[in-house]
Amino acid sequence: AGGEGHDSQANMLKLLHDLEGKENRKAQFRTAISLILDGKEYLFEGVIKGEIIKEKRGDSGFGYDPVFMPEGYDRTFAELGNDIKNQISHRALAIQKLCEFLQS
């Protein structure tokens, strides 16, 4: 959103303003984890698709959670709460892939 420091509220308001009147509000969060093991790099990616809703809803989580609604849900990340979010998030998906690799 500009300015100094990190301001999630200002970032969210800027995003909502920039999307006013837009039909396509598709969005996604993506996490990539890199593991270097014995000189070889392995990448593990997690993606959660969804959309940016028109107004903030919910008060858990951080960042864009109040305006991001994941596909297949009728609540934002901020409304779902940390238990559900931490099971379906882009970070959780990438970490799950990393753990499966390490266990194999």
Image (cartoon, helix red, strand yellow):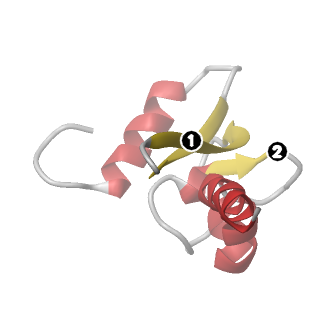
Report x, y in % for residue 91: 59, 57
1 vs 49, nearest the viewer = 49
Relative horizontal placement of residue 12, taking residue 100 as reference (left or right): left
Q: Nearer the viewer, mark 2 or mark 1?
A: 1
Farthest right residue in view: 72
Residue 71: give its label. Answer: 2
Taking the image as drawn, is residue 102 in sight?
A: yes
Whole-angstrom CA distance, mark 2 to mark 1, is 24 Å
Q: Quadrant of the N terminus?
A: top left
Q: Nearer the viewer, residue 12 or 83?
A: 83
Residue position marked by numbered label 1 in the rendering: 43
Amino acid marked by disc 2: Glu
Q: Is residue 16 left or right of residue 101?
A: left
- Does residue 30 appear anywhere in the picture? no
Could you classify mark 2 by the number of other residues whose Cα lies within 10 Å: few (under 14), some (14-19), or many (20 or more)? Answer: some
Q: Position of residue 37 (x, y in %)?
A: 48, 52
User: Which tag, 2 or 1, sits closer to the chain's start?
Assistant: 1
Residue occupying image coordinates x 64% and y 58%: 98
- Residue 1 lies left or right of residue 101; in this view the side is left
Q: Residue at x 56, y 41 (%)?
A: 43
